[in-house]
Image (cartoon, grey):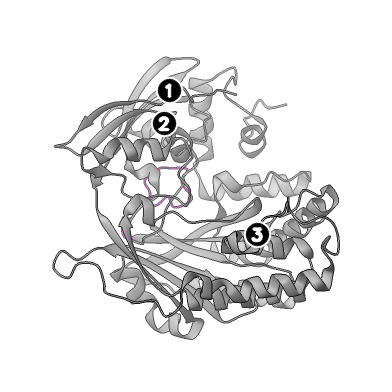
Amino acid sequence: MVNLALMDGILDVDKQRKTVRVQAGIRVQQLVDGLKDHGLTLQNFASIREQQIGGIIQVGAHGTGARLPPIDEQVIAMKLVTPAKGTIEISKDKDPELFYLARCGLGGLGVVAEVTLQCVDRQELVEHTVVSTMNEIKKNHKKLLSENKHVKYLYIPYTDSVVVVRCNPVSKWKGPPKFKPQYTKDEAIQHVRDLYQESLKKYGAEGSKGKSAEDGEQNIDELSFTELRDKLIALDPLDKKHIININKAEAEFWRKSEGYRVGWSDEILGFDCGGQQWVSETCFPAGKLANPSMKDLEYIEELKQLIEKEEIPAPAPIEQRWTASSRSSLSPASSPSEDDIFSWVGIIMYLPTMDARQRKDITEEFFHYRHLTQAKLWDCYSAYEHWAKIEVPKDKKELAALQERLRKRFPVDAYNKARKELDPNRILSNNMLEKLFPQSDTI
């Protein structure tokens, strides 16, 4: 394991070109804070800010916005430390083939030491959250994708509710919207507190299958919505009826939380994902911005039908986001066409307890859920898993099928050739790389 935590400096800012050169161990939030004084920021953000820049680009992480590519596309130059060739500098002008392979290189082509990123002017965004339905979404989908800088849908299983979150620059002429929320924050969450109190009576303080997550004596009124949801799920995480009740309460919470929020892009584009969790996220083509294929909505409809048919205790949300394409060869959104768009869909199960047996049961149910989506949906939609969330199969036949599948989408031979040239003794390799990208001399 290589730890770059102390390589966390900003080396150079070019205000004219709007670029920044950083050490790869810098965390996203540190970088954003360092860019503020220069009036700059990153083009897009993933849900959390704690990742290091080296890691976030190597796995092809992304934010949302059909005109905005994954984060690796912001990289305009890199310094790699390689076992065979020492320190090399690459860019689109200096060894472009290797540059596009290494931008999203899964750590297998060298240790990323420095990164030069294209930035944008710092700006305030207005976030608008509304609850819609699938029928309404279908009518407005193309418009929502093309007219909003950032947009995502949060689907709530076993309900028809879709939370639509869009973010756009604050209008210089109009300023932030004047809006008085219909409910206070307390009023929006009160019914969730009530459900928790009722559920405690039903299950008893210990829950049906084990201890609820690190309870302590925390006052229920101090808990955020995601903390309350964790406590509710912990009472009986695999009971479908219980999960449906929680999902309905979540839909109601979002209905009562509709409205606007204004802030800097790095503040607005984050998302409270809740506590510990299992996530599987896939990426698949969704047409072109001028002519979306609507496959993204078909995928969700099939997924929701699958959940109901198989009676999966699926909590909310199913998160759907979009990006433009990336020129990085190993990006799940890789495409030579700049106007291609890709949809990213994440399914989730929470691990809200510390009870070992309960965590094992949730894990087994999650992998059953993931396997069903894989079997029924992935091939039909040409969906590939996010590299940071991919699971290596233990079964030999399943592993061979995955290896073959990856070859259909990615330039595996070119990647392995570069690995051999830069790391002939596999110093940088690990179990995942060896399993997913076996080399001809792998025993």
**Image coordinates for residue 289, horizontal then vertical, percent:** 33, 67
The reply to whether the magenta stretch includes residue 412 is no
Question: What residue is shown at x 55% (from left), y 59% (from top)?
Answer: 383
Q: Callout 3 environment at 10 Å: few (<14), some (14 to 19), or many (20+)?
A: few
**In front here: 311 or 256?**
256
| Disc ID at residue 26 | 2
Relative placement, left or right, of 271 versus 248 is: left
**Which mark is first along the chain, 1 or 3?**
1
Question: What residue is shown at x 29% (from left), y 70% (from top)?
Answer: 147
Return the residue at label 1: 7
Q: Callout 2 environment at 10 Å: few (<14), some (14 to 19), or many (20+)?
A: many
**Image coordinates for residue 129, horizontal then vertical, percent:** 41, 71
**Considering the image in quadrants, where does the N terminus appear?**
top right
| Disc ID at residue 110 | none
Question: What residue is shown at x 37% (from left), y 33% (from top)?
Answer: 99
Label 3 secondary element: loop
Return the residue at label 3: 219
**Image coordinates for residue 285, horizontal then vertical, percent:** 46, 62
Relative placement, left or right, of 373 versus 92 is: right
Q: Quadrant of residue 164?
A: bottom left
The amino acid at mark 1 is Met
Nearer the observer: mark 3 or 1; the answer is 3
Relative placement, left or right, of 273 versus 136 is: right
Magenta-highlighted residues: 324-339
The reply to whether dot 2 and dot 1 touch (C-beta < 8 Å) is yes
Find the distance from the CA under tag 2 to the CA under tag 1.
7 Å
